[in-house]
Amino acid sequence: MLRYIIQRLLQLIPILIGISLLTFLMLHLIPGDPVLIFAGDKPMTEERAAEIRHQLGLDRPLWVQYGDYAAHAVRGDLGRGLRSQRPVLDSILEVAPGTTQLTLAALALATILGMTLGILAALARGTWLDTAAMTFAILGVSMPVFYSSLLMILLFSFTLGWLPATGQGGVARLVMPATALGLISAAVLARLVRSGMLAVLRQEYVVTARAKGLAPRVVVLRHALKNALIPTITMLGLQLGALLGGAVVTETIFSRPGVGRLAVEAILSRSFPLGTRPSTRGYAINDD
């Protein structure tokens, strides 16, 4: 068992290298000069821009920049942000609790809603309840996060005025983002639980349990559900990763501080991780 775990962990190394390399190259392929983007409307001569690029190490070949970045990342040094000049790791740790809160809330909502709908649909197979639950599942999978988020803001914030549209803090500001983020996962889990329950309910041990006169609640919860949840638990791990990815869109739409919104802002401003050389520890766009 230990040997198998070690082998699986070693297989992560080329995957992580590939992901970091693709991310690094994609960021550099985005049009625009990060120095000029950061300068904005401030006047800057070509000589000054070239000097700043040299200070930041942006004039070096890409493979040299990636080598420096990877070497520092292995030691836990992710560099400094172009705008904030703060360590990237500190910026991530500062907003990580908000993303964690949003993701866990969305996962809890998806688990409760998805399992409930899946069980009800399986027990009421062929009825209007089954049709309604599966219709919700299809709509949930088909509707993008950004679209459901905008619909919720329009309905619950602008039209009804029940919930605040943006910001972070308190349960009221968490309801809509967590719901919008968790709907897709809830739809996936509902379909998976339904199919698992239908397969288990036809098994002989369930039929035997019913023949013994056990209460339907006991048969469903203690015998059928326990075995039907085996593939669902595996799917929960995959959905957690999907929710973390979906947080990028959700945090941006609802203006919530988080890792996703931080990543979007860094991409838009071409804020490459800095600090790979001592000369990048401090600089100024202008001489004033």
Image (tube, helix red, strand yellow):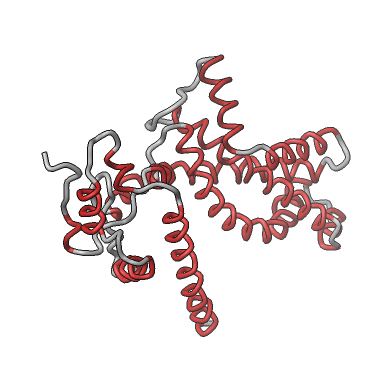
State the residue at coordinates (60%, 46%): 111
Q: How many circles with numbers are drawn on the protein? A: 0
Q: Give the farthest residue toward the front.
A: 46
Question: In this orientation, which residue lies closer to the viewer: 167 or 266?
Answer: 266
Viewport quadrant of the C terminus: top left
- Is 43 on the left or on the right of 208, as rendered? left
Residue 119 x/y as whole percent: 74, 45
Question: In this orientation, which residue lies closer to the viewer: 63 or 185?
Answer: 63
State the residue at coordinates (51%, 34%): 177
- Is 34 on the left or on the right of 21, as rendered? left
Residue 213 x/y as whole percent: 83, 51
Q: Give the farthest residue toward the bottom.
A: 3
Viewport quadrant of the N terminus: bottom right
Question: In this orientation, which residue lies closer to the viewer: 52 or 221?
Answer: 52
Instruction: Judge whether 158 appears above or below 65 on screen.
Output: above
State the residue at coordinates (40%, 46%): 32
State the residue at coordinates (59%, 38%): 145
- Is 195 on the left or on the right of 244, as rendered? right
- Is 229 on the left or on the right of 172, as rendered? right
Can residue 215 be seen here? The reply is yes
Instruction: Judge whether 210 appears above or below 157 on screen.
Output: below
Question: In this orientation, which residue lies closer to the viewer: 253 or 212?
Answer: 253
Instruction: Judge whether 3 appears above or below 237 on screen.
Output: below
Residue 77 x/y as whole percent: 27, 63
Can residue 97 be seen here? The reply is no
Residue 44 x/y as whole percent: 22, 41
